[in-house]
Amino acid sequence: MATNEMNVATYIRECSDELQRLSKDARLHLLEHIFGMAALEAAKYESEMRPPVVPQFDQFLSERADEEDYITYRRSTLQEALEDLVNVAANRLEGKARAAFYIPNECGTGLHRVAGMNAAYGAHTAGFKISSQSIACGLAAAIHHPVITYDVRHDPAWRPWQWLATAYDYRGCWSFPIEGRGRKMLGTFSLYFKEPAQANERDMLFAATITDTAAEIIGRRV
């Protein structure tokens, strides 16, 4: 992960209490400013490291492949940056929960894991439907509102997915939408608790800080 992004994540971890006292608009404005300054600094050094290249005609046919490689690179750096936020969440919750980030597919119909949990869990949930009839992150993305499930074993909507919760040993599941400007859906953030868990106001404020930060990270890479 880039040094600037690591510093931002460190700031969020160390100053989470102060950030939670701000309004959502003030918090988002501050995070935009921080990431904007980091991006400017990174761009300055990037221009020093990359010599100018004069395009040649024979490069035309490779442009599409280069573009695909660039998209792959952007996604890999996105994963790296969000993994750090996963660690921030895990540290704040003192190991009581695991976390994961999901981003929508190009059609905006399903979600795919990009960071957190593990690859096997991501394979089971690949393409998780975004719908008002869905659960967890799929429902949060559809209604643009947090979905707090105290105990998946006692929620009828979870019956088709209880095998997954049992296999990965969690009971409580909290999911939060990640929104960009104009309420554009950029993804979701989920927390998985081994025991049933209810969210309090402090939890919701912390989740808002994480999702606002994730919105800045995702918005710069997709």
Image (spheres, helix red, strand yellow):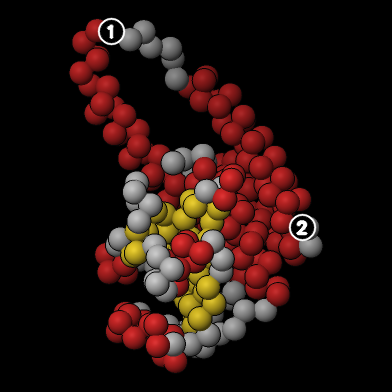
Residue depicted at 62% across the width and 79% down the height: 199
The image shows residue 67, relative to residue 209, as above or below, that is above
Residue that protrudes farthest toward the front in the picture: 132
Name the amino acid, label 1: Gln
Q: Position of residue 173 (x, y in %)?
A: 48, 78
Q: Nearer the viewer, residue 99 or 2?
A: 99
The image shows residue 174, relative to residue 19, as above or below, that is below
Residue depicted at 47% across the width and 61% down the height: 141
State which tag comes first along the sequence, 1 or 2: 2
Disc assigned to residue 154: none
Q: Nearer the viewer, residue 193 or 44?
A: 193
Q: Position of residue 193 (x, y in %)?
A: 49, 80
Labels 1, 2: front one: 2
Identify the residue position indicated by label 1 in the image: 56
Residue depicted at 30% across the width and 82% down the height: 160
Identify the residue position indicated by label 2 in the image: 23
- Which picture quadrant has residue 114? bottom left
Residue that protrudes farthest toward the bottom in the picture: 154
Residue density around tag 1, few if under 14, some if 14–19, many if 20 or more, within 10 Å: few
Q: Position of residue 82 (x, y in %)?
A: 49, 54
Q: Nearer the viewer, residue 42 or 72?
A: 72
Q: Is residue 167 left or right of residue 104?
A: left
